[in-house]
């Protein structure tokens, strides 16, 4: 089953009209107050079962790229799609649907990236997963989730 390509950005990626993305930070003070770093263990334990491994690694890689490369607010970081896809162990071939674009679409579907006029905004701090996603977690993760959120609130 292929995911429909709805965003013009993703359509351009699939059709090979663009080969790189201009990536920027997506700051959100509300999420920053209650969220977790995209590279945190929380993402590994709780977002991974929701997003899948490719989308999770892509989120972490994009977040790290923005954090390490951005020197000021609203810095734009160019990302070569073929190199990024290859570093994640997935293919990206212009002209056909591929795992790289599907992973980007999953991140958009869950509100972790959003297309911009010139590329992609990525959350470097992600929100806790939603209650409906918690209900779908394996039992041991569902039981552990409240402690993670409580620890965050205690630390704040």
Image (cartoon, rainbow, N blue to C red):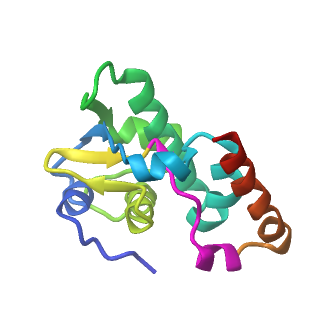
Q: Is residue 132 magenta?
A: yes
Q: Is 12 located above or below residue 66 in the figure?
A: below
Give the image location of residue 42, x and y in percent.
68, 50
Give the image location of residue 144, x and y in percent.
81, 62
Residue at (15% x, 44% y) in the render: 118
Q: Answer yes or no: is residue 15 visible.
A: yes
Left or right: where does residue 128 sit relative to residue 105?
Answer: right
Q: Is residue 154 magenta?
A: no
Q: Answer yes or no: is residue 89 visible.
A: no
Residue at (48% x, 32% y) in the render: 64
Q: Is 35 located above or below residue 155 in the figure?
A: below
Residue at (50% x, 47% y) in the render: 33
**Between 111 and 51, the one nearer to me in the picture:** 111
Left or right: where does residue 148 sit relative to residue 21?
Answer: right
Q: Quadrant of residue 7?
A: bottom left
Give the image location of residue 66, x and y in percent.
39, 32
**Between 21 and 1, the one nearer to me in the picture:** 21
Left or right: where does residue 50 sit relative to residue 76?
Answer: right
Give the image location of residue 28, x and y in percent.
37, 48
Q: Which residues are magenta?
A: 124-135
**Between 108 and 127, the one nearer to me in the picture:** 127
From the image, which quarter does the C terminus lie in? top right
Q: Quadrant of residue 41?
A: top right
């Amino acid at each position: 089953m292929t995911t429909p390509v709805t965003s013009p950005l993703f359509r351009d990626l699939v059709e090979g009209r663009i080969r790189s993305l201009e990536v920027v930070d997506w700051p959100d003070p509300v999420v920053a107050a209650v969220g977790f770093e995209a590279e945190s263990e929380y993402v590994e334990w709780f977002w991974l079962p929701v997003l899948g491994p490719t989308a999770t690694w892509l989120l972490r890689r994009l977040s790290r790229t923005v954090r390490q490369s951005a020197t000021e607010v609203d810095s734009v970081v160019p990302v070569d799609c073929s190199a990024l896809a290859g570093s994640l162990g997935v293919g990206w071939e212009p002209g056909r649907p591929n795992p790289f674009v599907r992973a980007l679409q999953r991140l958009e579907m869950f509100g972790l990236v959003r297309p911009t006029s010139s590329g992609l905004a990525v959350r470097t701090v992600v929100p806790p997963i939603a209650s409906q996603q918690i209900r779908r977690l394996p039992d041991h993760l569902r039981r552990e989730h409240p402690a993670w959120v409580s620890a965050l609130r205690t630390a704040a």
